[in-house]
Amino acid sequence: MKRTVPLLITFIVGAVLILAEFVPHEPFGNFGEDFSLYFDIIAVFAFLLGGGNLIRVHVTKVQRKKKDWPFSIVTLVGFLGMLAAGLLKIGNPDGIQGDVAKLGSLFNDLYMFIFTPLQASMFALLAFFVGSASYRAFRAKNLDATILLVAAFVILLGRTPFGLWLTSGLEGSLSFLQIPNLANWIMGVPNLAGQRAIMIGIALGVISMSLRLILGVERTYLGQDNE
Amino acid sequence: MELLRSRIIIGITLLSMVLMFGSALAQDADKRDVLDSTAVRVGTFKKPVNLPIPAQLDVVEDSEGDAGSSITVSWLPSPDDGAGKNNVIEYQILRSESQDGEYVIVGSASRGMTQFQDATTTDGVTYFYYVRTISKDGGANSQISAGIQSSPQWFNTKDLDTFIIGLIICAAVIYFIYHAQKGKKFFLRQIAGLEAVDEAIGRATEMGRSILFIPGINDMDDVQTVAGITILGRVAKTIAEYDTKINMPVSRSIVMTTARETIKQAYVAAGRPDAYSDDMVHYLTDEQFGYVAAVDGIMVREKPATCFYLGAFFAESLIMAETGNSIGAIQIAGTAMPAQLPFFVAACDYTLIGEELFAASAYLSGEPKQLGSLKGQDVGKIIAMIVILGLCGLYTVASISDSVSLLDFADKIKGLFSAS
Amino acid sequence: MGFWNTMLAVDRRWIFLLVFLSLLIPMFLGVTFKLSISPEVQTLYDTLEQLPNGSTVLMTFDYDPPSAPELQPMADAAVKYAFKRDFKLIIMGLWPQGPLQAEISVREAMKDPEIQARNLEYGVDYVNLGFQAGNEFVIQRMGTDFREAFPRDIRGTDYSEVPLLKNTKNFSNVDFVFNFSAGYPGTVEWVQIAVDRFGVKLGAGNTAVQAPLAYPYLGAGQLVGLLGGMRGGAEFERLTGFKAKATTFMLSQTFAHAIVIVFVILGNIAYFVTRKKEQ
Amino acid sequence: MHFDLGVWIGAFLTLGIISFLYKDNPWYKICEAIFVGISAGYWIASLFWQNLVSKLYDNLAPAIVALFHGQIQYNLLYLVAGILGIMMLLRLIPQIGWISRWPLALVVGATAGLQFINYLVSNGVKQIYNTIVPVFGPVSDAGGIPPVATTGEGIGNVIILIGTFTGLVYFFFSKEHKGLFGGAAKVGTWFLMITFGASFGYTVMSRMSLLIGRIDFLVNDWIRGTFG
């Protein structure tokens, strides 16, 4: 009961959804869409578990005065404040009927003035990390690493004016050696080939993984046998 | 034994070729039927001055392999299409519920096109169509089609080839799972990232530091996350045996629930159920960059000795991997997001590339059934390789010898892979 | 050799600092590149120039703030240009945050004294239809009737109540479509549906990462022109005469890029020099 | 001097995040704490209205009302979604926590089924289709295959073919990378390396532009905006 029923559910749902792909007739044609709707709804219920966990972790931290506990208060205030602003639609020009992110509501203000700059700044850290990662990774330590380096270097050069400038002397039949052309060629030929191999491999990996799940060969995610 | 196996593989491959070719022929036969029963009356036209020569209706039929509510109208292009001062601007498609009734425009198609799908029909209602060819001077009408109805189909014939290809790969995977179960042993090559798992956990144990496990930032409706969780199941067992600490911040509530079940089972299986605690897995936020901000914080403060990144990743991959690198952790990553693989390769010690991520849990489990499925995957690869090489060769021969019949033959087989 | 040893294991914070400075300093330099204009930018500009004053132009903002550094300058220049030519401007977005980015461009354009003097009126000279979910299907629906896809504008006014939209039923009433795109849905979808099926004239501004995907459409004539990344934006700014952010941004970007290249070279020199020494 | 609170908050948060690059510090910790709290609240509240209210309640409530009037509507099926959601919550009660595996089993089964098809079509079959081209011309344009225009393109096609082929060889699990097969796998890894290097190099520029956006905000909106 505790494990057989779930395995059965997985099997039936998985198999039906695969077959439904080939049956356009109602109701099968919509199964995929229906599922994503169901999933969204289940996920919202699950938020109670996640959100509850977030509160519990930080309340415990504050209670036990663990390291950095004052920051937990900040998290809790931010979380509960944002939640209240959103669920009660505080300051929403259209009241509780209005769109939750309506311009002028507290929820939208918090989003615009706090959420957005944080998100953009965190994203922007990538510029730094791209720098430090290329410094370390692109070194000709062995053959593989050298190939990685050369490909990256040509592409990097090809996207700046230097690339053209360096090799503008190569004209006529040698013009394909100009770095921007070379960069385009790398993107369009060997890069494409590698991408294809990766993608076909992924397709096979997913198919095999899906079958293992549907057939119940892989069942670790269901937890233990008897509880 | 080796001989038998290769024979089976060749057998499956040949069978697949036969099946695919058969389905191509079947599809072709279908098309012929339609042409024979063309529901169109074709007449002759007088060309008025300055108006374009009208397009002629070709086939008007219920759209194939759909859920109904759609009729496909196709036409032979007007001779004025594409050139001249009467050049066609567009084709308008008009519809009525009775032959002599009022016709209304249901859509238009730009010049050069010869087909239109009217997806606004009601099943069971009879419609009549004609096509109006528009040039700058006005429009010229085609004949009116015979009455036609739309209806839903039970099988999508357009996807028959996909169905068969899927079936063959499934058959191969199931065949090898079955044989593995019977006790047949398969050779499997080593994957460096997986060989390193035990060592990485051992290192954390020796250093008395924790292990960080990141299952990506997608929810359980992404098979990559599921793959990450199944690997967690194996890794957690070793962690339980070594009595190492695991810290698993997640960005999805359902992943949290699933990960807890998985780790708990691993601890029970390792005979140490008491050592398990729900606190090993904790939820942070669904927001991609909020999650990374917190994970980065955890990394620099807790300094885990080992970091696993296994699942679906986006731009945050490099932020985490670089921070992990800066604290000197051993990093094992795996994802099927092609855009993020380069960053993991650059910043991590080991990276499971695409397919290897999905194979990892099978590898680590060591269960014959699971390993068998990997052998089945390889059959899929053989098919892909044979198809690619064979058809490219065929095309090349066809184009060098300029043989139309050979080209047609190659097109037909290639058409099997034109999945919609 | 001590120098190279240090270089090999240089504290990454130095790298961070250099990246930061390489982006920051060009913003104060005021140096401008002498840019040659790429053909795809030129054709886009020429097509716009050929439109009669007062034409109806649809601008679709299919990106969000993270891509704004690359796309906003183009959008700013395009909106300004449209207002100066008295184009009737219809704004929309297939990305939720796109129409908000458009508002930023409009606000920016309104700061221009020449445009201010025209007393442009919302609803008469320009309108923002807002965001509509549904990706390419929105374009599809617009093919028959804009109103079906956008029953109301961003301010909640009914489609039929907006004076500018009185005579705009579908793509056949639009003279030009300008798409700013950072991915899906974006230029590819606009080409496949609006151009291929409804025959609109389409120009696009893409992020540097997206642009190569759109190049094939230029060759086939499905796109009249393309602005690729900051460089495309800078070239467009030069053509329209609105020298603004793309030009400075491009300098920053090129500088930072050069810094990364220098790092890679230094890293390799350090590696080889120190290795030789060990041997 | 012109003071805009929104801009100052933005600047405070932006610099706080960037300060992490130097080292972990209380400023970053505050930003991180705010970010986690606000964003978790943002998603939960947004999805509450979007999914629970708009998708579940708005569809289910009328169907239930209709049920009392003796009508059975298709939307009643949403009840199943609601029940599955509640089952998920039963984890909170240890005695019957195992019921939460049912919705989970549904999720995993559906994911397996749907992605099986998606990947088969778009990653597998389509990629194979695109790889099939004549490697050497001359070709009549009759068959609808792109003709090979130049020798260069022909060579390109051969390289794509070799790369895809050897790449697949690399991914083989059940054969040891030795001998000729190992050689092919080695070539495959070279192609993968080119792919990784090229994609990495290709992304650098757009990553820089992200930071340009933030610096532009700091320089122009914040400093120039405040102090003229």
Image: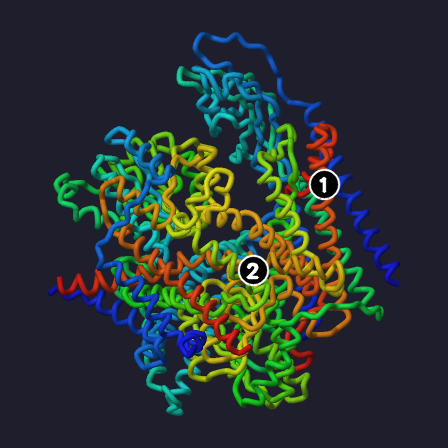
Q: Chain of mark 1?
A: B
With respect to residue A111, does C9 lie above or below? below
User: Mark 2 falls on what kind of element?
Assistant: helix
Q: Is residue B11 left or right of residue D138?
A: right
Whole-percent x, y for residue D5 in the image: 19, 67
The reply to whether residue D111 is in sight is: yes
Residue nearer the viewer, B274 or D67:
B274
Mark 2: give few (<14), some (14-19) or many (20+) Cα within 10 Å: many
Q: Which residue is mark 1?
A: B393
Q: Residue at x 53, y 54 (%)?
A: D75
Alpha-carbon span between mark 1 and mark 2: 29 Å
Instruction: Find the residue positioned furthest to the bottom.
Output: A64
Where B78 sits versus B8, above or below?
A: above
Q: Quadrant of the C terminus of chain A?
A: bottom right
Question: Nearer the viewer's eye, disc 1 or disc 2?
Answer: 2
Q: Nearer the viewer, residue C248 or C223?
A: C248
Task: Provide the chain ID for the residue under circle 2.
Answer: A
Q: Which residue is mark 2?
A: A147
Number of labels in the image equals 2
Q: Residue at x 60, y 37 (%)?
A: D151
Where disc 1 sits, the SS reads helix
Label 1 neighbour load within 10 Å: few <14, some 14-19, many 20+: some
> Tags 1 and 2 in contact by the CB under 8 Å rule?
no
Residue visible at 68% across and 71% down? Answer: A219
Amino acid carrying mark 1 in the image: Gly
Where, by quadrant of the figure, is residue C121 drawn? top left
Residue C111 placed where, x, y %? Answer: 17, 49
Note whether residue A46 is visible. Answer: no
**How far from the left and from the top, in percent, is residue B79?**
53, 16
Residue at the left extreme, as displayed: D1
Disc 2 marks which amino acid? Ile
Q: Residue at x 27, y 48 (%)?
A: C155
